[in-house]
Amino acid sequence: MDIWHLRGGNRLEGACFVQGSKNASLPIIAASIISPARSELLNVPQLRDVDAALRILRHLGCTAEQWGSDVYIDSAGLCRSAIPHSLMVEMRSSVIFMGALIARCGSARLSLPGGCQLGKRPIDLHLAALRQLGAEIDEAGGEINCQAQELHGADITLPFPSVGATENIMLAAARAKGDTVIRGAAREPEIIALQEYLRAMGLNVTGAGSGTICIGTFKPEKAVSHRIIPDRIVASTIACAAAATGGNVEMRGVDPSHFSTVLHFLKLAGCDIMNSKRSVRVRAPGKLSAVGEVSTEPYPGFPTDAQPVLMAALLKAEGRTVITENIFENRYRQVPELQRLGADIAVSGRRAEIWGVDCLHGSALTATDLRGGAAMLVAALAARGESTVFDDGHITRGYERFDMRLRSLGADIYLEC
Ligand code: EPZ
């Protein structure tokens, strides 16, 4: 059990670097097995989920090591195509190994993935698309067995731009005979990052970032070096923490275009936002204003992963904000915990109405999921007095040395592991 001890009230001030992206790293680590090439990945965050992905690679027979923020993978020795349940349940992205394994081995056996409990989170879109590529898939008792002697290219239309399904199709299609087109694809920066990595591996893939991705021939390279993009959700969290505490923080090594919708709402709330190509400064007023309506949408809309931390930032904002969560049906699990701090939030279905209060007070909280847990830290930093966040390892799945990063900005925070 991780226990986060915080004393709120300090303005966050100063500058910090933002870690590499978890959600870009994980599919790229899975992608590393589609050919026996060696991969060097730079700027990979040191996180439990990354560690879990590397353990899956080692289980499959690959060499996989992390030294600081560098990861080295040699998948020449891959000799298994089954992932045991104990490794699958550690994180949601383990499902991306399905596309990678059928590309490399023509078979994959795994169980339903773990990850944050944000709703039902089915994988029907992944399975339907892989079937279109020629995979035969049996599902029974939470076990998934995929066989594909030879995958063939297909014209696939996703009814919803699922990030994971888009990634799985890109990986499986990499080794399919003939071209594949994905229509209605997810457009997230992490999809563009995966395309860059796959191109470096020798795959002819274009269109990521638009709704249509085309995957053609693969001429495998022997070795690949790739730098992971900065984490836009960690950047959003730090920006929200700066806003919540009336702070003045410069985030370095970020791509402001990746989280411009979050910055847009912080600006509406009254913050000064100063962008350069690789940094963003957020300077907050003494009192924030409510921002009206916020709806989560697939990229380039407002990201669901930043919804809990923006909510936390607005708990003391003057007026009413209404959030509509359109991506996950159960992503307000942080709300009862934020209410313990004195927040005035009413949830009705997918809508959450937040009335700014004058003051939040410290309390004992329990982290419910990764971003919900981060939201509790943001709110506790803006609360008067001491808070404790009890966390069964959610926050450290996505935030690297977050206590140190916040402490360097003046936060009174200490993580007891
Ligand atoms: C990715 O999850 C991210 N995870 C999530 O980040 C993020 O919240 C999500 O995309 C949306 O942006 C990683 O990249 C590892 P989806 P993913 O498939 O791929 C439904 C975090 O906090 N759906 O785009 O699982 C699904 O139930 C995490 O870092 C189906 O119905 O997201 C959900 O409602 C949490 N059938 C919606 O689509 C499917 O087959 C979006 O899911 C697949 C998805």
Image: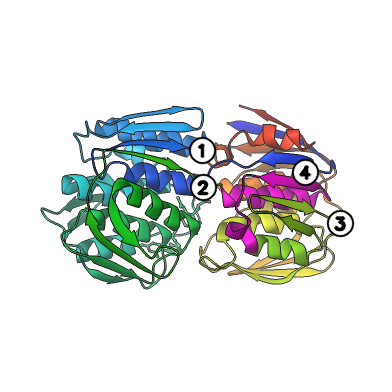
The verdict on residue 252 being magenta is yes
Foreground pick, 310 / 329? 310
Q: Which residue is mark 4?
A: 381
Instruction: Answer left or right for 259 relative to 317.
Output: left
Kindly identify the residue that appears in the image at 26 percent across and 65 percent down.
128
Q: Which residue is mark 3?
A: 285
Span highlighted in magenta in the image: 231-260
Q: Which residue is mark 1?
A: 43
Q: Label 2 near label 4: C-beta < 8 Å? A: no
Measure the C-alpha gap from mark 1 to mark 3. 33 Å
Secondary structure state at the residue bearing disc 4? helix
Q: Label 3 near label 2: C-beta < 8 Å? A: no
The correct choice, above or below, for 36 with respect to 261 in the image is: above
Question: Quick check: which quadrant has ligand 1?
Answer: bottom left
Could you tell me the amino acid type at mark 3? Answer: Pro
Classify 10 Å Cα crowding around label 4: few (below 14), some (14-19), many (20 and above): many
Measure the C-alpha gap from mark 1 to mark 4. 28 Å
Q: Label 4 near label 3: C-beta < 8 Å? A: no
Label 4 C-beta lies within 8 Å of the nearest ligand 1 atom: no
Q: Label 2 near label 1: C-beta < 8 Å? A: yes
Could you tell me the amino acid type at mark 1? Answer: Asn
Q: Which residue is mark 2?
A: 229
Could you tell me the amino acid type at mark 4? Answer: Leu
Q: Quadrant of residue 273?
A: bottom right
Could you tell me the amino acid type at mark 2? Answer: Ile
Instruction: Answer left or right for 3 relative to 342.
Output: left
Q: Quadrant of residue 155?
A: bottom left
Instruction: Answer left or right for 148 relative to 407.
Output: left
The main secondary structure of the magenta stretch is helix
Can the viewer see residue 333 in this picture? yes
For marks 1 and 4, the one nearer the N-term is 1
Kindly identify the residue that appears in the image at 56 percent across and 48 percent down.
231
